[in-house]
């Protein structure tokens, strides 16, 4: 089944989300060590057809790339090298961690579970992907 993958890349951990086959809903998928992200995606692609990556891009409030953008740029180069036939879209990731915490609270998650950064990362990836999927101009093929 065709899937769009949302990625919240971080220096240590990377949150992942996947679209449903209709490209309407994003669901948190997993959090993996960033050094293992390409291996994870290659294994995932053996069972599912990835038609696009949506990568959260870190921006400052003024709209300029943040310091973390360098790490994401290096990851983007590697992603495009390892998956040359899969298009990549960038999505502004400002405030996704705040939104992820809010979603965790609204979902009734216990405070101790909300401290788990891995949960925040994969929920952030789902928010990034859902933001992309909700746009009327989003490419879904």
Image (tube, helix red, strand yellow):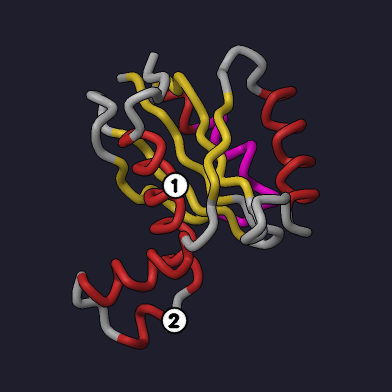
Q: Main secondary structure of the magenta part?
A: helix
Q: For residue 122: magenta?
A: no
Q: For residue 36: magenta?
A: yes
Q: Secondary structure at mark 2?
A: loop
> In this rendering, is residue 28 above or below 44?
below
Q: Between label 2 and label 1, give the one nearer the viewer.
A: 1
Q: Secondary structure at mark 1?
A: helix
Residue 32, image quadrant: bottom right
The answer to whether mark 2 and mark 1 are in CB contact below 8 A is no
Mark seen at residue 82: none
> In this rendering, is residue 78 above or below 65?
above
Relative to 65, 136 lies left or right: left
Q: Residue at x 40, y 25 (%)?
A: 138
Stretch of the chain drawn in magenta? 32-43
Q: Nearer the viewer, residue 19 or 136?
A: 136
**Disc 1: CA contacts within 10 A as few (<14), some (14-19) or many (>=20):** many
Residue 136, image quadrant: top left
Q: Residue at x 76, y 41 (%)?
A: 73
Q: Nearer the viewer, residue 8 or 92?
A: 92
Mark seen at residue 115: 2
Q: Earlier in the sequence, mark 2 or mark 1?
A: 2
Relative to 69, 113 lies left or right: left
Relative to 108, 83 lies left or right: right
Distance between mark 2 and mark 1 Cα atoms: 20 Å
Q: Nearer the viewer, residue 63 or 122?
A: 63
> In this rendering, is residue 44 above or below 2?
below
Give the residue pinned by disc 1.
Answer: 128
């Amino acid at each position: 089944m065709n899937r769009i993958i949302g990625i919240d890349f971080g220096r240590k951990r990377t949150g992942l989300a996947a679209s449903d086959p209709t490209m309407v809903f994003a669901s948190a998928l997993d959090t993996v060590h960033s050094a293992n992200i390409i291996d994870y995606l290659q294994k995932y692609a053996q069972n599912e057809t990835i038609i696009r990556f949506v990568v959260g891009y870190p921006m400052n409030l003024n709209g300029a790339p943040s310091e973390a953008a360098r790490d994401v740029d290096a990851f983007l180069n590697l992603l495009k090298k390892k998956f040359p036939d899969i298009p990549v879209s960038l999505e502004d990731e400002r405030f996704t961690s705040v939104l992820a915490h809010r979603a965790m609270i609204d979902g009734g998650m216990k405070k101790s579970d909300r401290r788990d950064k891995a949960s925040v990362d994969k929920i952030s990836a789902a928010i990034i992907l859902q933001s992309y999927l909700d746009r009327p101009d989003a490419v879904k093929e």
